[in-house]
Image (tube, grey):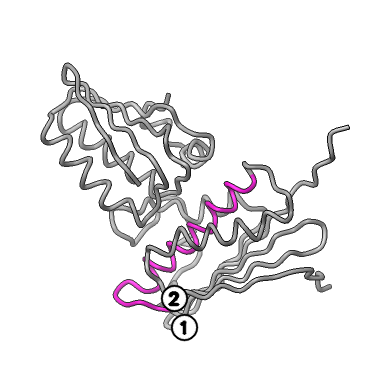
Amino acid sequence: MKTKCTNYITLEFLSHSANEGFARGAVACFAAQLDPTLEELGDIKTAVSEAVTNAIVHAYPDRLGKIVIKARILEENVLELSVRDWGRGIADVEKARQPLFSTGGEERSGMGFTIMESFMDRLTVRSQEGKGTRVTMRRRIQPRRAVQ
Amino acid sequence: MEMKYKTENRQLTITLTGELDHHAAKDLMDSIDRCMEQNLPTKTLLDLGGLTFMDSSGIAVVLRAKRRMEALSGTLVVVNIPRQASRVLETAGLGRYVDLV
């Protein structure tokens, strides 16, 4: 059954590391309409930062390429994010998702996927070598009741 | 991302302000390395109190600083960790390797 989308945005940008802050900030602004707590917003920003950094470091290690983020608001206060690149892809997704696995530089810890998994409710990774990767994440924002 | 430091009796205190992500991490690691090499501290306090955001790049920064201090036969303590950064460090289980206060 398809989940109804009530609002969405699409962001497209080049894989410059300077765009990491822009990406998480823009998604956080969009997610704010779900009235998240500061902690929920921090979790979303962290997950976006990890996914975008993976694309910058691993998908396009020796060139600049296109990254597209789609953020959708679904029924029941669910935020869905997909981060897509058209880079070199991941040969073994299961291995890449293991904690401390990294083929990045020394400024990477190999904890990106672990943090995305821990901070979001759901994470799926689809990748094809030479064609790119799509990371999709969902997080339900807890509805807050007004103080009486 | 801004880094400031002060030294007193071979104790180095490094204070970070701003957002610590992959974009900032490489330069920051180099700056911390240089700072330690110049001051040869026996103890370093890494003060994260001014961070408004940190992702897993911060884990790599902390581990690198820890290794540098071990090479100097010194210790590293990470202090004033904001809630968001703390969640990242806890998820990585970093408390098993580094003193987090």
Residue range highlighted in magenta = A40-65
**Distance of mark 1 from mark 2, alpha carbons?**
6 Å
Q: Main secondary structure of the magenta part?
A: helix
Residue A41 x, y percent position in the rendering: 62, 48
| Chain hosting mark 1 | A
Considering only vertical position in the picture, is B18 above or below A5? above
Q: SS of the residue at dot 1? A: loop
Considering only vertical position in the picture, is A99 above or below B45? below
Query: In the image, is A104 to the left or to the right of B90?
Result: left
- Dividing the picture into quadrants, the one containing residue B10 is top left
Query: In the image, is A144 to the left or to the right of B87?
Result: right
The mark total stands at: 2
Identify the residue position indicated by label 1 in the image.
A131
Residue that lies at the very extreme toward the top in this rendered image: B9
Is A46 magenta? The answer is yes
Residue A148 x, y percent position in the rendering: 89, 32
- Disc 1, disc 2: CB below 8 Å? yes
Q: Of the residues shown, which amino acid type is indicated by label 2?
A: Gly
Is A22 magenta? The answer is no
Residue B54 x, y percent position in the rendering: 45, 45
Residue B8 x, y percent position in the rendering: 19, 19
Q: Of the residues shown, which amino acid type is indicated by label 1?
A: Lys
Q: Which mark is residue B6?
A: none
- Dividing the picture into quadrants, the one containing residue A137 is bottom right
**Pointer 1 or 2: first along the chain:** 2
Query: In the image, is A86 to the left or to the right of A74?
Result: left
Q: Which mark is residue A89?
A: 2
Quarter placement of the N terminus of chain A: bottom right
Look at 35% across and 54% down and name the residue there.
A108
Nearer the observer, A73 or B52: B52
Look at 33% across and 52% down and name the residue there.
B24
